Image: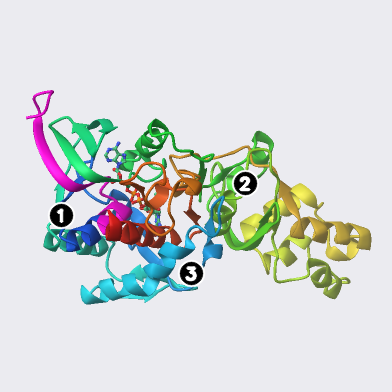
């Protein structure tokens, strides 16, 4: 019994959070014959894994490099990603007989559902002797010689404490700010955090103009500051989403303008010139290249209804410019409720990139999304969770 009359347990390693990084770390530490206990406050493990990739879990990306990650220190992620690569994770997936396929650009998804990945991790945990406590409320954490973690049912003493509580997005799947609170409690710096890979919300004027286009998607190039992303954009009833917008949201800060090239592979002015003498309406001409609903709405807003032969060259030049440079200033993002990830987090200056251990507090580790390493869309975030969890599992 502990001082507060709770059951006192002793473990080599306690991991907070049974998500992607926590499970991976537990497997590796367990294989080293460390006694490992994961504490999870939800009723199930890996809720984000289950819904990831639209239920098929985009579990890694074979075209991975440090450039796919945003962090105040772009070099920090290199060591872990080199020591546990996408191919190491693929090896594990294949050993478990899980079928997968490449969707595009190196993105690997399960052929079945994401439950396959979760079951694989659970099986590996079981064979590594990992204990998992669900529905567990974590209270105070102190450190003297070792860590003392108090929960609603017991107090645990541990040599190593690994924080794998993830980012702040999707609170209904278990996200909390516990990792950040623990970091601050131990005097560690935390970088500015924000929702990322998240839809953008129109201001009221744009909403009036484009709100009715909800459901329309098109291929575009989206720019924000010095970054340009090519891919699909999707009109929603609140603003814009789709892969290109989600990706750009990681660079976007309140007040920033984004520029959208609606015909990135074509020269709109050249197309107009080819049909210069035609009686075709601009909206019908544009419908040959853009979704009909969009081109009609766009012409309603930007071009009076008349045959193309009645437009002056100056007018056509201006319309072409607008198609290649649609500028909007989103009002906000849809926030943590709809963000796939959180960017920012535990300052990487506080951590060893080799072990993920904090420099100031021996035995304390941070892994996964809680760290200031944010991946792009396409399997990079789970790979960061696997890689950072793997390396911490070799030392914790
Ligand atoms: C809708 C959606 C789809 C996604 N799809 C993909 C995808 O296809 N590919 C990809 O690479 N990435 C995807 N991601 C991102 C990816 O899921 C995360 O980056 C990854 O799960 C992070 O792993 P983690 O271990 O750091 O955190 P998580 O997997 O979020 O795990 C954190 C765990 O800690 C627990 N926890 C939190 N607070 C506490 C507390 N106070 N006490 C106890 N436990 C706590 C949580 O309940 C959770 O189980 C997706 C994210 C979302 C939201």
Q: Is residue 273 above or below residue 295?
A: below
Q: Earlier in the sequence, mark 1 or mark 3?
A: 3
Q: Earlier in the sequence, mark 3 or mark 2?
A: 3
Q: Which residue is mark 3?
A: 64
Q: Which mark is residue 130?
A: 1
User: Where on the picture, by quarter, is residue 187?
Assistant: top left
Q: In the picture provided, is 144 more to the left or to the right than 54?
A: left
Which marked residue is nearer to the observer: mark 1 or mark 2? 1
Q: Closer to the camera, 368 or 396?
A: 396
Q: Disc 1 beta carbon < 8 A from ligand 1? A: no
Q: Which residue is mark 2?
A: 252
Across and down, in percent, residue 150 comes to 20, 31
Residue at coordinates 69% horizontally, 60% vertically from top-left? 262
Which marked residue is nearer to the observer: mark 1 or mark 3? 1
Q: Which residues are magenta?
A: 1-25
Q: Closer to the camera, 31 or 176?
A: 31
For label 2, the crowd category at 10 Å Cα-Cα, with few meaning under 14, some 14 to 19 and many 20 or more, is many
Q: Is residue 23 magenta?
A: yes
Residue at coordinates 32% horizontally, 56% vertically from top-left? 392
Q: Helix, strand, or loop for circle 1?
A: loop
Q: Earlier in the sequence, mark 1 or mark 2?
A: 1
Across and down, in percent, residue 359 comes to 42, 46
């Amino acid at each position: 019994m502990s001082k507060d009359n709770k059951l006192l347990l002793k473990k080599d390693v306690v991991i907070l959070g049974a998500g992607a990084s926590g499970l991976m770390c537990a497997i590796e530490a367990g294989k080293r014959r460390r006694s490992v206990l994961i504490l999870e406050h939800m009723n199930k493990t890996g809720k984000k894994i289950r819904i990831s990739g639209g239920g098929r879990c985009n579990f890694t990306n074979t075209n991975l490099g440090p450039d796919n990650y945003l962090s105040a220190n772009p070099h920090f992620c290199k060591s872990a990603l080199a020591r546990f690569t996408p191919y190491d994770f693929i090896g594990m997936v294949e050993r478990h007989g899980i079928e997968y396929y490449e969707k595009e650009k190196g993105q690997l998804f399960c052929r079945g559902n994401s439950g396959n990945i979760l079951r694989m991790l659970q099986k590996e945990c079981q064979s590594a002797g990992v204990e998992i406590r669900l529905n567990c409320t974590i209270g105070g954490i102190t450190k003297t010689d070792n860590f003392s973690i108090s929960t609603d049912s017991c107090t645990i003493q541990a040599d190593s404490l690994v924080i794998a509580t993830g980012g702040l997005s999707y609170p209904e799947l278990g996200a909390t700010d516990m990792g950040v609170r623990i970091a601050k409690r131990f005097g560690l710096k935390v970088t500015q955090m924000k929702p990322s890979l998240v839809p953008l919300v129109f201001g009221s004027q744009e909403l009036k103009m484009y709100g009715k286009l909800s459901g329309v998607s098109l291929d575009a190039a989206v720019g924000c500051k010095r970054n340009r992303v090519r891919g699909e954009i999707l009109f929603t009833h609140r603003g814009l989403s789709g892969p290109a917008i989600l990706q750009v949201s990681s660079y976007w800060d309140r007040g920033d303008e984004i520029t959208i090239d609606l015909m990135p592979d074509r020269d709109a002015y050249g197309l107009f010139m080819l049909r210069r003498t035609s009686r075709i309406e601009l909206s019908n001409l544009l419908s040959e290249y853009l979704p009909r609903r969009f081109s009609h709405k766009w012409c309603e807003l930007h071009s009076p209804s008349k045959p193309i032969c009645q437009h002056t060259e100056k007018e056509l030049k201006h319309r072409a410019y607008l198609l290649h440079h649609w500028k909007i200033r989103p009002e906000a993002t849809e926030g943590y409720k709809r963000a796939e990830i959180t960017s920012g987090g535990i300052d990487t200056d506080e951590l060893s990139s080799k072990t993920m251990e904090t420099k100031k507090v021996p035995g304390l580790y941070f892994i996964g999304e809680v760290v200031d390493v944010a991946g792009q869309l396409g399997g990079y975030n789970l790979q960061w969770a696997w890689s950072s969890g793997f390396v911490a599992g070799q030392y914790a």
